[in-house]
Image (tube, rainbow, N blue to C red):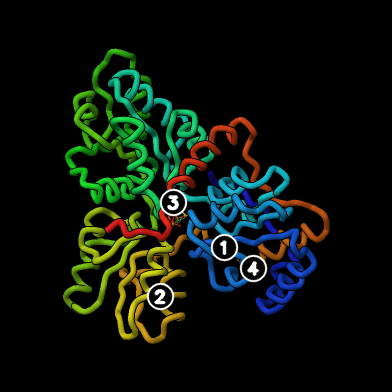
Amino acid sequence: MILFQPPLPPKYSALTEDEMALAIAERKRTLGSRLVILGHHYQQDEVIRFADFTGDSLKLSQIGAQQKDAEFIVFCGVHFMAESADILSDDRVKVILPDLSAGCSMADMAEIEDLETAWDFLVDECGANLIPITYVNSAASIKAFCGGHGGACCTSSNARKVLEWAFTQGDKVIFLPDQHLGRNTAYAMGIPLDRMVVYDPKTQRAAGFRPRGRSIALANDGQLTPDHVRNARVILWKGHCSVHGLFTEAQCNEIRRSDPGCKILVHPECKWEVVQKADLAGSTEFIIRTVNESPPGSRWAIGTEIHLVHRLASQHPDKAVRSLAGIQCLCTTMYRIDLRHLLWALDELVAGRVVNQIKVDPETKRLAVLALQRMLANVAPQPVAIK
Ligand code: 13P
Ligand code: SF4
């Protein structure tokens, strides 16, 4: 969801980085235990140093759910993460996103009306015994649909455990919005590619309302028929991350050619072909742990967001850490959270005003929390590799 962020008062443009940093530290002291700042690993260094807790999507959801005492969670991340924090935290807690335009293009690729249309076709018409699983990178309405239809959320840290659970509940899974995380995870579980099909909501929408009884849904990279659905174990929603989509097989080949000792470590939002070429694939926490635990002198080409890669490189001067891509793979929406917006949100709190509160309506919350709780019930003790 892309929300409009009104411009900040002009005084914020006049401040230097040092002035803003000092002021943020001061506001944090003033608000004390009333405030918790959460920061996703893709945030800029100047922002993340003010986070009380850092983590990937799963860890931050867990921490959000534990916040019983704080009055405010300021979420330095993107919109769907702030929504999850609002769903999981105590009703008293107000969740604030410092810049409302910090959305996620992948989450926007799954809209509730399209999911309802897909469900009609797959369940009512094709008769699939289907469990809906949504990556946590999705709107609260999608989470609520999954919660209300016996499904769950997952993150890249526990996608496999959640899929394994889903197959104890039904015969087939529809996985959304990230086709790549779905495909990579299902393949790692031993499900062959020819038992997965892609459902394309845009093609379906372009085909308009399809009267019941017509057997062809215009979807997939061609047409998705009830026979395709019957043969499939996993129906992958046609969505992707525009950042991780920038990593390619050619970049992997180039690393292999130019630096044979270098290990390729990628996030499972990367395309299947890239994950196959990589040495290891796993969530953001898995990537961090792998580099942290690697011996001095080891060399890593990493396929994930550039701020995390730079941070790992500067934290490990004894290791060679670089991006898998020559180009800068930056999440531009994560980047919208900057010191100015963080300071403004804290200034307003100190003045007794809550700005940019992310609030999920109670009915959506009631069902979405079921999906998130099933996600939190399927967590491995350590982030596990997908490959
Ligand atoms: P994780 O935090 O689950 O690794 O996901 C990465 C991401 O793209 C968050 O938007
Ligand atoms: Fe969304 Fe990709 Fe950015 Fe994560 S990295 S917030 S999935 S666009």
Circles 2 and 4: CB atoms closer than 8 Å: no
Q: Which residue is mark 4?
A: 339
* Badge 4 amino acid: Leu
Marks 1 and 3 sit apart, C-alpha to C-alpha, by 20 Å
Give residue 90's position: percent from left, percent from top: 67, 45
- Return the residue nearer the eye: 298 or 44: 298
The CA distance from mark 2 to mark 1 is: 19 Å
> Looking at the figure, which quarter contains the C terminus?
bottom left
Question: Which of labels 2 and 1 is toward the front?
Answer: 2
Which quadrant contains ligand 2? bottom left
Q: Quadrant of residue 345?
A: bottom right
- Disc 2 or 1, which lies upstream in sequence? 1
Q: Residue at x 22, y 62 (%)?
A: 249
Residue 379 tag number: 3
Task: Check the image and name the residue furthest to the right.
Answer: 351
Numbered circle sitting on residue 292:
2
Question: Could you tell me which residue is drawn at 45 percent across and 69 percent down?
Answer: 308
| Front in this rendered view, residue 366 or 260 | 366
> Label 2 vs label 3: CA separation?
21 Å
